[in-house]
Image: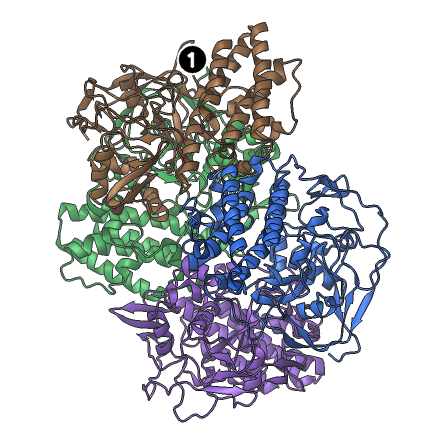
Chain colours: A brown, B green, C purple, D blue
Amino acid sequence: LRLRFATVRDFTEELCRPLAVEDFVVQAMPDSSPTKWHLAHTTWFFETFLLSRWGSTYRPLSAEFRHLFNSYYNGVGKQFPRSQRGLLTRPTVEEVFAYRHTVDECVSELLASSDDAELSEIVELGIQHEQQHQELIITDVKYLFGCNPLAPVYRELGTQSSTHLPRPARWEPFSGGATWIGHDGPVFSFDNERPRHQVLLRPFELQDRLVTSGEYIEFMQDGGYRRPELWLSLGWTMVGQQTWTAPLYWSQRGGQWSEFTLGGIRPVEPHRPVTHVSYFEADAYARWRGARLPTEAEWECAATKSRIAGSFVEGQHFHPVAVNETESELAQMFGEVWQWTQSPYTPYPGYVPAAGALGEYNGKFMCNQYVLRGGSCATPASHIRPSYRNFFPADARWQFSGIRLAKDVVAGSK
Amino acid sequence: LRLRFATVRDFTEELCRPLAVEDFVVQAMPDSSPTKWHLAHTTWFFETFLLSRWGSTYRPLSAEFRHLFNSYYNGVGKQFPRSQRGLLTRPTVEEVFAYRHTVDECVSELLASSDDAELSEIVELGIQHEQQHQELIITDVKYLFGCNPLAPVYRELGTQSSTHLPRPARWEPFSGGATWIGHDGPVFSFDNERPRHQVLLRPFELQDRLVTSGEYIEFMQDGGYRRPELWLSLGWTMVGQQTWTAPLYWSQRGGQWSEFTLGGIRPVEPHRPVTHVSYFEADAYARWRGARLPTEAEWECAATKSRIAGSFVEGQHFHPVAVNETESELAQMFGEVWQWTQSPYTPYPGYVPAAGALGEYNGKFMCNQYVLRGGSCATPASHIRPSYRNFFPADARWQFSGIRLAKDVVAGSK
Amino acid sequence: LRLRFATVRDFTEELCRPLAVEDFVVQAMPDSSPTKWHLAHTTWFFETFLLSRWGSTYRPLSAEFRHLFNSYYNGVGKQFPRSQRGLLTRPTVEEVFAYRHTVDECVSELLASSDDAELSEIVELGIQHEQQHQELIITDVKYLFGCNPLAPVYRELGTQSSTHLPRPARWEPFSGGATWIGHDGPVFSFDNERPRHQVLLRPFELQDRLVTSGEYIEFMQDGGYRRPELWLSLGWTMVGQQTWTAPLYWSQRGGQWSEFTLGGIRPVEPHRPVTHVSYFEADAYARWRGARLPTEAEWECAATKSRIAGSFVEGQHFHPVAVNETESELAQMFGEVWQWTQSPYTPYPGYVPAAGALGEYNGKFMCNQYVLRGGSCATPASHIRPSYRNFFPADARWQFSGIRLAKDVVAGSK
Amino acid sequence: LRLRFATVRDFTEELCRPLAVEDFVVQAMPDSSPTKWHLAHTTWFFETFLLSRWGSTYRPLSAEFRHLFNSYYNGVGKQFPRSQRGLLTRPTVEEVFAYRHTVDECVSELLASSDDAELSEIVELGIQHEQQHQELIITDVKYLFGCNPLAPVYRELGTQSSTHLPRPARWEPFSGGATWIGHDGPVFSFDNERPRHQVLLRPFELQDRLVTSGEYIEFMQDGGYRRPELWLSLGWTMVGQQTWTAPLYWSQRGGQWSEFTLGGIRPVEPHRPVTHVSYFEADAYARWRGARLPTEAEWECAATKSRIAGSFVEGQHFHPVAVNETESELAQMFGEVWQWTQSPYTPYPGYVPAAGALGEYNGKFMCNQYVLRGGSCATPASHIRPSYRNFFPADARWQFSGIRLAKDVVAGSK
């Protein structure tokens, strides 16, 4: 555990290496946070839930940090307003790193000297929490750079060997029936993945790979963004208000679609999975294809048979990669892009949030959000599980979110 | 059918009798509509979906009405902006009634001369639609009058014979298991109630009556509106932004709670069901009691055994009534107040919306809303069913919405 | 005075004659008010400032009216929020008329029995106040009807005998120098017109008639609304935000400009004065012509020589009328449209507001408004004076506001 | 000129010395800008108006800068949106300094090789422009730091020798009459100070020093922020919306007023001039004292007799300093705090803006702003003049703005 703690904490700093000091400071929109804030908040998490309880010799660097870097834990006290995180030019980046290192040393000593089970559990939670913020650092930096007409490069992207269009998608059938979903067992999971329980599924089919940018362009060319009958009512309102005509980061230059990536502006490659679409766009695309999005139970039912392989943050592609031609059966279930499901984020039957302030981690967000599954090219590989539930509001687009299609088996009586 | 058509249409006008001409015109908030608009829009529904197809001799009174009184049917063309419905002082109330009567005559003739099945189906849908707007007329007028410091009286409310506090609530157990929900059979239902399908339920318990105002005041007195740990995150934001400290229409005068009703301002009576609470308040109340809201499947499973009895709009109470002391078992499942469930409003597995513009009736609103069940004192009795799914956003309070508690059976493994 | 009181009060009701009950109720935007509110507020004025002091036998119809119909007099107590005036469907129109007549009788009796000078002054002020609201009734009803796709007709407009383009505008020179402006003497004036004082004017010229719609179309055709260099910075922001491309009420149908008038939608007639332009548009137009707007001192200096003649509300044109070909010298100084001046609305040197709550009439609005002069086709003729200062924010367009050009005499050293 | 250019440009960088890299990046509110942006924009000014015309060998570092660092010159092309200046983490601070130095060298060479009069004029304008942004750097950094609960220190403030309350203010009389104001002659001035012209002034009096914090506290203690009769209507709205109860940066800790300064949080010292008040507060304070604010003409008439002495940015007080006890007559006319006048910012009679894009410097902002006079402790001493017209909207508080009282001479007939 001590080693994993160190490895994960170091990897966060590794992800910051391409950034200039200036890049750590700014909050480009209310839903994103400055990198500096992510670095401090994940540290605050260990300080608050671990050191303030077990770290008998630990003395906080600054009492103000308790307030400044609290995200949303009312149980720990008032929070500095989320929308103003970008105003905090101090502490400086250097001071935040010093804060991290002080806390890291303390946690490391604690881990060396204690094997309290509860302590280990909180360290494990803190590591998982750190990994979630690693993904947010990537997506928030992408959003920040995407606002800048200079289109800064985070890291040069590799080119993909094959640029062939992927094989046509096939429909993979599942028989449904009473199915167990959710997490059980000793391995870590978040409280929102529990308890494991049975659901009844009707027979269904999933497409055996992700929807590609090329396929999505067909939707656009068929007037997808101009036809209200394809959209949820709130989605159609959004299209109008935000003047959406393509996924986030796409722009048209001379008849060709380009997209801003972490490697700068590049032509949209049709064989790669489409990404940075909202739930509304995913849902409209599916309706246009005469299909639908999977429920999270269907997705999990299918995913338990899949190997956890694909592009994750460790692979440093920082962009979803086209399906491997030779891959068989259900491809791209993990990595590349988060897959929107049609399931609102709700508590599983019998759900019990963790006790105390840590109970605020998941449960209180179960309103007006949709579940996404499978992880993305910005997710740590060791962080994802078949039962993992990510969640975002229906209009969120700055995550690496994409589409897999599902449909009912036609024989079913309706 | 022709008789039902006439009866229902007349009843709408009956509900308007207490109104002055001035009361028909104003839109008190974006979610409500002027009574005049309700009268015209329900008429437009018959004109658009029935007369423009079957009414060979029908000539529209005004071509502009097609646009002015279209609510949200993109398939029928552009709509006049919802938020500006209150700007239309013309057509006058008298002209709108004339519009109604012209269309009514035409529909009546059509029904006398044809028994086309599809035609009958649309008339039936139009009648159900009319009944939904009857409820909205009541709730929208209440909201409008509630904004007026003169607190106008819509109709004098009766006093309730007994003012005793109701018997303590008991927990009614249900065994769960594979359970059929949804509508089937020849009787009318909306497309969102179909298809009938099985769900797996764990054992659960429901309280055998609605939560009362007296019980809700205990929540308030225990700091319910000041304790973030009881609230969903979005709910807590709402409490702050809207400075909620009590249900809608409540105000404190000299230490006592009063509420604005359709009979004017009256003391809050502790034995009546609490109403005009949002999903957020219902959910927080349940958490505070150590319970939860039922899912819509649990509710429907329980309700199929209940008689459809209680206060409906025909009873003209215009306010929820306390539970009858002698009533046995599961009381108040229908009428009085809509019961918030914890279920987001989603399509049933295999859901297929109606074809054409009428397909916009329900499906496109399946996002960021919660299901309510059971009807209210403003719902027509003939309109409600066990499988009936009403839906509103989590912050809506102007409907007669209330609370029934549920909980897991403790023996169950979690 | 008693006769004038009766005449002016009656004329207000005369202006309401074309309205349906529905038209009295609605507030079409925050800056406008329902006609019903105007009727009640002007009555409240007499009740509050006159009857509550001198009307020993007067008993208020409703204590709530003191609050409901107070516009902005903090000295009299809290006001019902301005933006919610349209929510008050009660008191009904009939009740408001009853309120008026009760107060009218009382005032009339009081006037018959007393010749207290202070009392007379307040009645005079109340009459002038009533006349201001007569103009607002006209402009607010126009705005309300203008929002309605049915384009209701308030009253049929007469056609103008001549449709010839007016003679070219000529520049009328004024020598400037030390000039007296402001009001003095026994005749009524508002406190903001006093004290009479001297200002220094440089030689200047005024155009001898108002700018016409035809001339304004030339500005539009020359890209007036697309050229930032013609606009004040705030004006240019407004053009973008509000997507202004023409005066308020104008729309293009088949290449021709139409405008909504109190007589319905009619072709824009090029020889009539342009109206419903904001200060920003008037200023941009003047800059485009190489001219400027007059200062209020220049305007008043010129106007003292002019007869008060032109279209006023009594003439019932309800639309500005083209200049009379035979008219000589400085035409259209009064009536037709209010003339924007380049003068911010500020206190005259030595300005002292009236004592008590009546001191809130003018002084507290002297911020971020511009002075307009001359009256309009909706102003009572007996209400206007050369020293009369009307004022509106720079973006206001719903008044009958128009343009007269001024320029410096070129010989002047700059 | 070449030396002045170098000195002023260097001083800008001198002012940045206390800042961490992080502090250069953030835009704390729409009206402020990041320091980095100020550094780049002032450089852009020389690049755009000088080098692109005379710098034959100059090659722009980045074509994008033309767009990114254009503030509001429509004549030069589209601008990057003002409210998003804080999103530009790139170019980095280092790159911006490199940009400065490249342009500086080029300008310096140009000045060494040419004495073109027009070129000199633009350099002079650029220097004045640079000085304006020096003041903005100070006030914007103060605002940024003031948002941070850590209350960073920009530079330690000196303590003032005397902490005695200043002598009571005396009224200094002026006889008025025809008075010349505005700038004339060869020395630099902005176009808005010209042409010099005569105005008629009535006799008036000015207080012989600025209003102090101690005096302002008396206003607060007398309910100044709770009495609508003291306020302009828009000001009173502002008090409510922004919940103003004291000047910006003030907070109450244990019954004592503290204020955030560029030296951190310090007790409010009653003998120092009050600052960070809006026009609304200055106007309300004056009314409460039975006085008024001076017009800009009155102020200039009085100031021409005063020496330009006081705290300026070069003195590095970074906070207004109490009046010197021995100072005679009219003290503190320059430096310390900008003095709100009651004059809206309007063109002088005969005003002609500069030609081309530089004409956008002043004229287009002449709407809804008030003139301030005299400079502040953040203004360069060499930048101020008796005729200098600064301007801000009536609700602006983040500048070092303060109050001097004026009044009419009582003998005057009103």
- Within the image, what quadrant is residue D210 found in? bottom right
Quarter of the image that includes the C terminus of chain D: bottom right
Residue B187 lies left or right of residue B235; in this view the side is left
Q: Is residue B23 visible?
A: yes
Residue C92 at x, y = what percent? 48, 66
Residue B311 at x, y = what percent? 41, 42
Camera-nearest residue between A147 and D301:
D301
- Within the image, what quadrant is residue B85 found in? bottom left
Residue B68 at x, y = what percent? 31, 59
- Within the image, what quadrant is residue B165 found in? top right
Residue A339 at x, y = what percent? 31, 27
User: Which residue matches tag 1?
Assistant: B413
Q: Is residue B323 visible?
A: no
Camera-nearest residue between B169 and D246:
D246
How many numbered marks have been drawn onto this rendered protein structure?
1
Q: Tell me the amino acid under the disc marked 1.
A: Ser
Camera-nearest residue between D256 and D209:
D209
Quarter of the image that includes the N terminus of chain D: bottom right
- Above or below residue D321? Residue A63 is above
